[in-house]
Amino acid sequence: MIGYVTIGTKDMSKACAFYDALLAEVGGKQLFGMDRIKFYGTAPNAPMLALCIPYDEKAQHPGNGTMVAIPAQGIEQITRLYKKALELGATDEGAPGERVPGVFTGAYVRDLDGNKLCFFEMKM
């Protein structure tokens, strides 16, 4: 249902270093791109995350209420992603834990540009 989600950055090289290391934890990598936009994923025909310098050349800012959710396998991987993101310079937005008992477990961070990320597992 989702092809890709785009989030802005003000520093492409710092953003790429952050996402190269973070998404490697879930089998993701930079698949393709050009100077102002880079696409990450596991395959070009699977959902992707794109980092971009805004096309209108105005300042990047994170959207209020916008969040990218990255699936994980269990609380151990959620915790590993959360800790890796913090190690890479992200800020805490909610420690790993069960949010909806028996259904949803997640952890939340903001990346170097303030974009909100969730690492989660949904059991339904």
Image: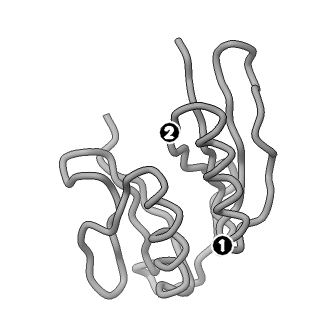
Q: How is the image coloured?
A: one colour
Q: Is residue 17 above or below residue 49?
A: below
- Residue 39 falls left or right of residue 89: left
Q: CA distance from mark 2 to mark 1?
A: 19 Å
Q: Residue at x 68, y 53 (%)?
A: 82
Residue 112 is drawn in which quadrant? bottom right
Q: Residue at x 56, y 24 (%)?
A: 122
Query: Of the residues shown, which amino acid type is indicated by label 1?
Result: Leu
Crowding near pointer 1: few (<14 within 10 Å), some, many (20+)?
some
Q: Is residue 22 above or below residue 118?
A: below
Disc 2 to disc 1: CB gap under 8 Å = no
Crowding near pointer 2: few (<14 within 10 Å), some, many (20+)?
some
Query: Of the residues shown, which amino acid type is indicated by label 2?
Result: Pro
Residue farthest to the front? 76
- Residue 40 falls left or right of residue 62: left
> How far across and how far down the image is residue 49, in percent?
40, 58
Q: Is residue 113 above or below residue 120?
A: below
> How far across and how far down the image is residue 6, in percent?
43, 61
As helix, strand or loop, the secondary structure at mark 1 comes to: loop
Q: Residue at x 32, y 46 (%)?
A: 47
> How far across and how far down the image is residue 66, in percent?
61, 50
> How far across and how far down the image is residue 13, in percent?
48, 87
Q: Residue at x 69, y 45 (%)?
A: 79
- Name the residue beneath numbered marker 1: 88
**Quadrant of the image for the N terminus?**
top left
- Name the residue beneath numbered marker 2: 71
Q: How many marks?
A: 2
